[in-house]
């Protein structure tokens, strides 16, 4: 774990979610979030990212009760430092109140609980973030246009999911197969301009749609691509 330090001027953070910080930290060769590191210090993540830089952890020192620390991301490589002292707060409530003041928040509910869903509470935002790292043309789109494309794929995935269930139960008519074919062709046209492809799954027991990206990155056990979620947000 890094040395304790006082909070200094907050940099202009590119991060929206703690998972982005974890990925950048790992990609820059650091080990703050490695399972072995967190296990050694008995570290638990207690909040999501606040204002792109702050979050709360808890640790259990040897022969002492679990206590809480305020952490700060201080550069684009996802480096972490401690605001104040490690294990400075005896309760999560105390740490949350302190973070509210440090971050200049009006309400405690502005400090979100950690996302326990697959990847991130904002699934559409997470997919857009992945795709922006894979394609310059996609990254050049506005945030709204990025989300619009990802949301359109989500609605297409929901449609394909319904068709997969119907195919399993009663079979599809020739007209339904024709519509499916036309819709999948249109989906491919929308993504290929950014260098992406699509993989389709007709098994109703699994996700129906995956995005293939230039790096070959996947997030599913079958290594078919980046999973297109069937909902925009995960409800905690």
Image: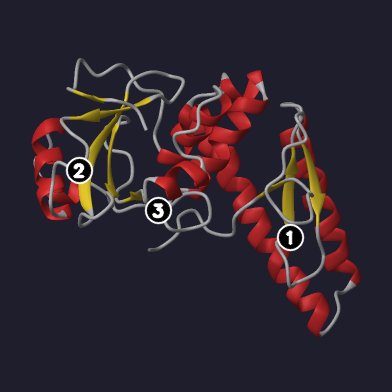
Residue drawn 68% across the image and 62% down it: 159
Considering the numbered disc 2 on the image, is that residue within a helix, a strand or a loop?
A: loop
Q: Give the alpha-carbon distance from disc 3 to disc 1, as whole Å.
A: 24 Å
Tag 1 residue = 208
Residue drawn 79% across the image and 56% down it: 222
152, above or below 82, in the image:
below
Estimate the x, y position of residue 54 in percent, counting from the top left. Answer: 27, 34
Q: Give the alpha-carbon distance from disc 1 to disc 2, as whole Å.
A: 45 Å
Estimate the x, y position of residue 118 in percent, counting from the top left. Answer: 53, 56
In the picture, measured across the screen, residue 198 lies left or right of residue 52, that is right
Q: Which of marks 3 and 1 is nearer the N terminus?
A: 3
Tag 2 residue = 87
In the picture, measured across the screen, residue 5 lies left or right of residue 190, that is left
Considering the numbered disc 1 on the image, is that residue within a helix, a strand or a loop?
A: loop
Tag 3 residue = 115
Question: Which image quarter: residue 180?
Answer: bottom right
Give the camera-side residue of 96 and 64. 64
Residue drawn 19% across the image and 22% down it: 7
Label 1 neighbour load within 10 Å: few <14, some 14-19, many 20+: many
Give the camera-side residue of 97 and 12. 97
Give the camera-side residue of 152 and 226. 226
Q: Which of marks 1 and 2 is nearer the N terminus?
A: 2
């Amino acid at each position: 774990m890094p040395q304790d330090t006082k909070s200094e001027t907050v940099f202009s953070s590119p991060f929206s979610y703690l998972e982005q910080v974890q990925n950048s930290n790992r990609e820059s060769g650091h080990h703050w979030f490695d399972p072995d590191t967190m296990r050694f210090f008995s570290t638990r993540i207690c909040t999501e990212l606040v204002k792109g830089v702050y979050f709360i952890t808890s640790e259990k020192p040897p022969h002492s009760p679990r206590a809480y620390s305020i952490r700060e991301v201080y550069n684009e490589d996802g480096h972490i430092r401690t605001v104040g002292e490690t294990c400075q707060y005896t309760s999560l409530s105390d740490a949350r109140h302190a973070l509210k003041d440090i971050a200049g928040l009006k309400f405690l509910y502005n400090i979100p609980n950690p996302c326990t869903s697959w990847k991130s509470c904002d699934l559409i935002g997470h997919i857009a973030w992945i795709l922006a790292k894979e394609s310059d043309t996609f990254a050049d789109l506005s945030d709204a246009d990025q989300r619009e494309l990802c949301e359109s794929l989500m609605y297409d995935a929901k449609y394909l999911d319904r068709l997969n269930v119907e195919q399993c139960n009663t079979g599809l008519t020739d007209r339904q197969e024709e519509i499916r074919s036309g819709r999948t062709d249109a989906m491919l046209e929308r993504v290929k301009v950014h260098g992406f492809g699509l993989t389709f799954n007709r098994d109703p027991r699994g996700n129906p749609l995956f995005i293939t990206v230039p790096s070959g990155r996947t997030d599913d056990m079958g290594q078919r691509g980046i999973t297109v979620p069937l909902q925009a947000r995960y409800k905690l």
